[in-house]
Image (spheres, rainbow, N blue to C red):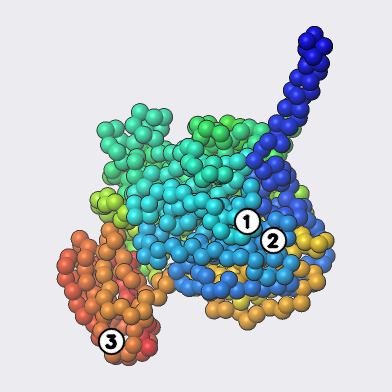
């Protein structure tokens, strides 16, 4: 006995040592976790490259000296998935061990050989084509990988895990119901056995949240709500005794980032609901339009920084947060950045949410009926787009950022789509620069009374860019140490909505453009070194990977519904040994405002004020045969018209609520129409 006891001690010691050594290896997928924590190299295993969302790759076979030789290695069509005007292709393909995983705006996923483009499997989502709660195009921003599975959210508010080898469904978990206004558009992140995913629906009166799921089972572990319940911290920023916060938006449009050392997961939130009506929600309205950190294991609140108080301009924080490490005044700092729709980049300390360089609260113009916030945060540094609107004929008032409005339209810039919208912002540790896409556009903002109805639009106003008013873009390098512009290029089209980018150790920024071009820029100077016409709107963010010693750069090109770029269903991969030449340029996106989005065929009725949106036509673009009749029916509350814009040669006249008027179109042509009392409402009839 004594002997065996004596022998037991070293055995126990060995066991406990083993336990300590083995512990970290018990992570559910140690290899993916290691890649997620490391600088991106051969594989690109999550939407933002790794847990930082920097979209920076250490690959440098393709560099500033040889990028001019880059050609298509392969190009595939995704079998017609999400091919059409209602879709946007905004997903970054992922690559692991020579296999590429890509998803489309119809939530159909594909695995292909990353060297050849040969299909390995396909998953057809079969999502309901009648989902009526999609805000801004049918979109999926990407997938995540871990534990031999591919994870993503769907527009029908399910989170799905597929077997990465076969594409077969492993589990499917409903987060909510689309009928209640909830959809999923963001890419999840996977880390340490968990999936983190946001939810969309800020235009439909929903309660925003980050949901954490167990990767193996799909079980929901916790929900971190971005809107406080009564009595919770932040509830004091909503009117007392109301449940307005429970439908106040603050949704999560984009992929979170995660710092394993600090144990925090980071994300940004969208607009407040109702978007343009602040009258009913006095207060700062936390946590709308904010940068947030929560405990990665429990979802417990850690810190927040609100970019826009009491948002009435639809100034969502929509671009993914970026984690970066820097040195300021000789002190190493852990930073987090986000490019807002306001046109500013917000730089914070990610340990506590405090500004890195300074952000000043300044007084702003007031509109008591809108209960406007007294001050707004103005970051130290440069805005990447102009922040004042020009006066346009037909409008009484034009203002700068944070100009308030009521029921008479006011022109304001940036419009509610940016600045920087959903596009990501890469960061290069070599240059210390952020690469920031931006939209230059003016909107006429108006407010109206809006009742909440489950599953209906809940925006309380509108922002329409005046028909034929100019719109364009910028692409800017911002120095992370100063938040100042280093270089900036002007773009003929809006960027920051589509038009994603990434940066490499080869000194290159790769950028897709809405006119179909795929570009390589010198990361230091912004000089264009290469361009290639992909044939479709190149609006998704690109990525890079290596297979068998060869570096590839890949991008999904399928256009963007809200930019109005040419739709498609292609994925391109490029390499220095590529043989494929450019395609013909597709029709370019518009450089002036006007109706965009899908064109309805086979309809004979246009409803005015439908879907709880007073100032809009449904559908707003219609194609008919010459000799057909369209009936305009006012289902809104106010009087409206549909009036031919240029020649005024046809007009429904004033239609009271419930009124109808039929118009017959005999001459082929393309006709814009507006509402005479509300000229910021417009639509288009194409007669063939
Ligand atoms: Cu009207």
What distance separates the C-alpha of mark 2 from that of mark 1?
Answer: 9 Å
| Foreground disc of the pair 3, 1 | 1
Viewer-nearest residue: 70 or 531: 70
Viewer-nearest residue: 347 or 618: 618
Percent of width and height locating residue 253: 49, 51
All told, the count of numbered labels is 3
Callout 1 secondary element: loop
Say the numbered circle drawn on residue 99.
2
Question: Which residue is tagged 3?
Answer: 628
Residue 351 visible (yes or no): yes
557 left or right of 25 in image = left
Q: Going 34% across and 49% down the picture, which residue do you hit? A: 205
Q: Going 48% across and 51% down the picture, which residue do you hit? A: 172
Callout 2 secondary element: strand
Q: Going 24% across and 75% down the picture, which residue do you hit? A: 632
Percent of width and height locating residue 577: 80, 71
Callout 3 secondary element: strand
Question: Which residue is tagged 1?
Answer: 164
What distance separates the C-alpha of mark 3 from that of mark 2?
Answer: 51 Å
Q: Going 27% across and 50% down the picture, which residue do you hit? A: 452
What distance separates the C-alpha of mark 3 from that of mark 1?
Answer: 51 Å
**Sequence-earlier tag: 2 or 1:** 2
């Amino acid at each position: 006995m004594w002997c065996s006891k004596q022998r037991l001690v070293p055995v126990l010691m060995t066991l406990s040592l083993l336990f300590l050594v083995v512990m970290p290896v018990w992570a559910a997928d140690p290899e993916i976790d290691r890649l997620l924590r490391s600088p991106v190299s051969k594989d690109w295993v999550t939407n933002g490259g790794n847990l930082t969302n920097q979209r920076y790759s250490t690959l440098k076979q393709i560099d500033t000296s040889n990028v001019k030789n880059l050609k298509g290695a392969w190009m595939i069509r995704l079998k017609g998935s999400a091919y059409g005007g209602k879709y946007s292709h905004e997903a970054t393909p992922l690559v692991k061990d020579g296999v590429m995983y890509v998803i489309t705006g119809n939530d159909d996923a594909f695995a292909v050989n990353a060297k050849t483009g040969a299909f390995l499997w396909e998953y057809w989502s079969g999502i309901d084509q009648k989902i009526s709660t999609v805000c801004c195009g049918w979109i999926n921003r990407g997938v995540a990988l871990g534990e031999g599975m591919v994870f993503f959210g769907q527009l029908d508010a399910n989170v799905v895990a597929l077997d990465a080898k076969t594409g077969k469904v492993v589990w499917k978990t409903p987060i909510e119901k689309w009928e209640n206004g909830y959809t999923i558009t963001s890419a999840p992140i996977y880390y340490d056995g968990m999936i983190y995913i946001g939810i969309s629906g800020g235009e439909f009166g929903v309660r925003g949240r980050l949901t954490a799921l167990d990767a193996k089972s799909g079980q929901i572990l916790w929900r971190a709500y971005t809107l406080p319940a009564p009595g919770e911290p932040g509830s004091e920023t909503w009117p007392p005794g109301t449940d307005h916060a429970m439908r106040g938006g603050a949704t999560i449009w984009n992929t979170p980032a995660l710092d394993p050392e600090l144990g925090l997961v980071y994300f940004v939130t969208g607009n407040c609901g109702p978007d343009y009506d602040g009258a009913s929600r006095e207060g700062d309205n936390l946590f709308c339009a904010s940068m947030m950190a929560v405990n990665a294991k429990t979802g417990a609140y850690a810190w927040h920084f609100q970019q826009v108080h009491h948002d009435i301009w639809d100034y969502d924080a929509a671009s993914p947060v970026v984690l970066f490490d820097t040195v300021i005044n000789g002190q190493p700092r852990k930073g987090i950045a986000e490019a807002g729709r306001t046109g500013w980049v917000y730089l914070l300390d990610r340990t506590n949410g405090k500004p890195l360089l300074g952000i000043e609260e300044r007084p702003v113009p007031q509109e008591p009926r809108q209960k406007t916030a007294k001050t707004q945060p103005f970051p130290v540094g440069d805005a990447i787009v102009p922040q004042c609107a020009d006066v346009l004929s037909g409008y009484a008032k034009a203002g700068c950022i944070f100009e308030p409005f009521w029921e008479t339209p006011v022109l304001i810039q940036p419009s509610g789509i940016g600045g920087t919208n959903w596009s990501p912002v890469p960061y290069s540790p070599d240059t210390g620069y952020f690469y920031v896409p931006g939209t230059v556009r003016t909107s006429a903002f108006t407010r109206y009374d809006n009742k909440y109805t489950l599953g209906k639009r809940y925006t309380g106003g509108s922002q329409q860019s005046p028909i034929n008013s100019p719109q364009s873009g910028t692409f800017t390098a911002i120095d992370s140490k100063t938040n100042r512009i280093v270089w900036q290029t002007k773009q003929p089209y809006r960027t920051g909505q589509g038009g994603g980018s990434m940066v490499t150790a080869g000194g290159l920024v790769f950028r897709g453009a809405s006119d179909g071009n795929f570009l390589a820029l010198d990361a230091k100077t912004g000089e264009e070194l290469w361009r290639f016409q992909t044939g479709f709107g190149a609006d998704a963010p690109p990525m890079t990977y290596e297979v068998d010693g060869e570096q590839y750069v890949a991008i999904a090109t399928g256009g963007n519904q809200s930019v109005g770029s040419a739709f498609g269903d292609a994925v391109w991969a490029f390499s220095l040994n590529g043989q494929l030449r450019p395609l013909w340029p597709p029709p370019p996106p518009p450089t002036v405002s006007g109706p965009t989005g899908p064109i309805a065929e086979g309809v004979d009725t246009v409803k005015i004020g439908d879907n709880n949106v007073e100032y809009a036509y449904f559908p707003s673009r219609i194609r008919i045969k010459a000799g057909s009749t369209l009936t305009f029916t006012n289902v809104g509350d106010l009087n409206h018209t549909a009036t031919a814009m240029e020649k005024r040669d046809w007009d429904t006249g004033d239609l009271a609520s419930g009124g109808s008027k039929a118009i017959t179109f005999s001459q082929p042509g393309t006709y814009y129409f507006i509402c005479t009392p509300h000229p910021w409402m417009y639509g288009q009839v194409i007669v063939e």
